Structure formats: C-alpha cells, structure tokens
Amino acid sequence: MRTFTIRVVIADDHPAFLLGVIQALAAAPTIELVGSAQDATSLIAVLKQTPCDVLITDYVMPKGEFSDGLAMLTYLGRHYPDLKIGVMTMMDNPVVLRTLLAQGVVCILSKADDPSCLIPAIHAAYSGGRYFSPIITRLMQTQEAPDSLPTLSQSEAEVVRLFVSGMTVNAIAAQQHRSKQTVSGHKTNAMRKLGIKNDAELFKYAIEIGLVPSSSAAAPQ
C-alpha cells in the first residue's frame, strides 16, 4: 500500500539549526524535504521552482534582498494561498504570536522545543489543522487571549511608530503639538494593551511585527 508523502520546504538563517531540522525530518517516512533556504530571497526562489505542501520557516531572517517577518508572510499568503505555513521562532509575546495566526500561519513552534515537534506540526498543517509546540502552548495560555487582537487607537499607534523609529517622547510631543504628558499617556496605554512592560520589549515587539524592519531589505512584491 502506497503511503502519502508531504512535500516540505524548510527555511532558517542558522545553518546548524537548519541541519538539525533536516535531520529530525529524516525520521519521518511521510515527509519529503524538497527544498531549503537561508533567507527570504532564496526561499521565494525555491517556492517558484519547487511545488510543496508545507513550509516551515524562521520568522526573522534579516539577510537577503527581501524583507522577512510580516512582509514575507503577507507575500507568501498572496502568491501561495494554498501553502500551509508553520513558523519557528524564539518570540515569547502572546500578542505577536496571535498576529502570526491572523496572517494565516497554522503552526507555531518554539526553537527551544525539541525538533521532533516538527513532525506532528507538519502532519497537522497538511491535514488542515493547527499545532503549537509545548512552549508556545504555555505562552499562549499565560495571557488570556481575546477573540481578536488588541486594537490601538490611531494616536497610540502613531506614538509607538514614532518612538520605535528613534524619536523621544519630547520630540514626538513637539512634532504633534501635544503635551509630553499626552504623548506619554498614549505610549503607556499602548504598552498596557499589548502586554508590554518596558521599552526594550516595545522595540522587540516592533521588530517582530514588522513595524521596524529587522533589515533594510525591501518587501517582496
């Protein structure tokens, strides 16, 4: 009896980690690794040439001609709507993780979990399901998740955007002709809604969702 085969492409910018993933998948007779990549540019090239069922990709891959992160996921969703996508990541913010789900990602795996988690994740994605690795499951449960992502007001979002771009609260206040207290209040409210406790986490969040690019690369069109 002929068994089914899931065609998989793997993308990660760390060669040693990528090798470990490839070795882990070799243990699954139902999975055929048809391609690999180390940045968004080479990933898109592989997908153009190689049909596959499931893509497992790192979220942050700053090398290459094209952007990574949300820009990459948006491109993939537009050009490969039938492709099942799983993301491997070290991100630990539940809000950001839910942002990935909103982008159509069906599996999220922590790089700190055992690589063997990839096999059930790929099977789940192929069959139309979802999969969270153990660490991701715990992270998603640490903060009661609403049905929708937290919504920032236009003023809050603009203050966050300007702040993570390098402007101080005083400079933002001067540009917007508002008081320092008003701008600081918008920033504080935004951080509270996002579950972010300090400026370092805010910058990390901005990079993870693509508000600040992890590289100077252009978004794929």
Image (cartoon, rainbow, N blue to C red):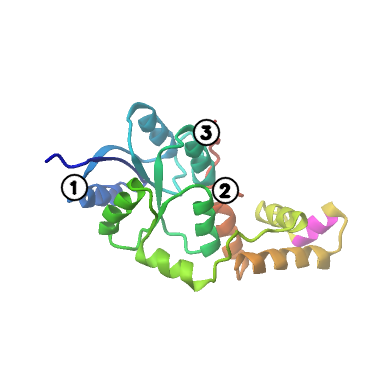
Amino acid type of the residue tagged 3 in the rendering: Pro
Amino acid type of the residue tagged 1 in the rendering: Ala
Amino acid type of the residue tagged 2 in the rendering: Gly
Q: Quadrant of the N terminus?
A: top left
Residue 54, horizontal then vertical, whole percent: 34, 42
Was residue 35 drawn as part of the magenta stretch in this picture?
Answer: no
Residue drawn at the location 39% of the way across and 28% of the way down:
48
Q: Residues within 10 Å of mark 1 (few under 14, many from 20)?
A: some
Residue drawn at the location 20% of the way across and 49% of the way down:
23
User: Between residues 8 and 125, which one lies in front from this camera angle?
Assistant: 125
Q: Which numbered tag is attached to residue 220?
A: 3
Q: What's the distance in space between the residues labelled 1 and 3, CA to CA?
A: 31 Å
Is 145 above or below relative to 48? Answer: below
Residue drawn at the location 60% of the way across and 67% of the way down:
196
First in sequence, mark 1 or 3: give its number: 1
User: Between residues 164 and 106, which one lies in front from this camera angle?
Assistant: 106
Q: Which residue is mark 2?
A: 210
The answer to which image quadrant residue 90 occupies is bottom left
User: Between residues 42 and 29, which one lies in front from this camera angle?
Assistant: 29
Helix, strand or loop at mark 3: loop
First in sequence, mark 2 or 1: give its number: 1
- Principal SS element in the magenta part? helix
Q: Which residue is mark 1?
A: 26
Residue 47, horizontal then vertical, whole percent: 38, 32
Residues rendered magenta in the picture:
169-174
Is 144 above or below relative to 84? Answer: below
Helix, strand or loop at mark 2: loop
Most extreme residue toward the front is 1
- Number of dots carrying numbers: 3
Left or right for 172, reference 37: right
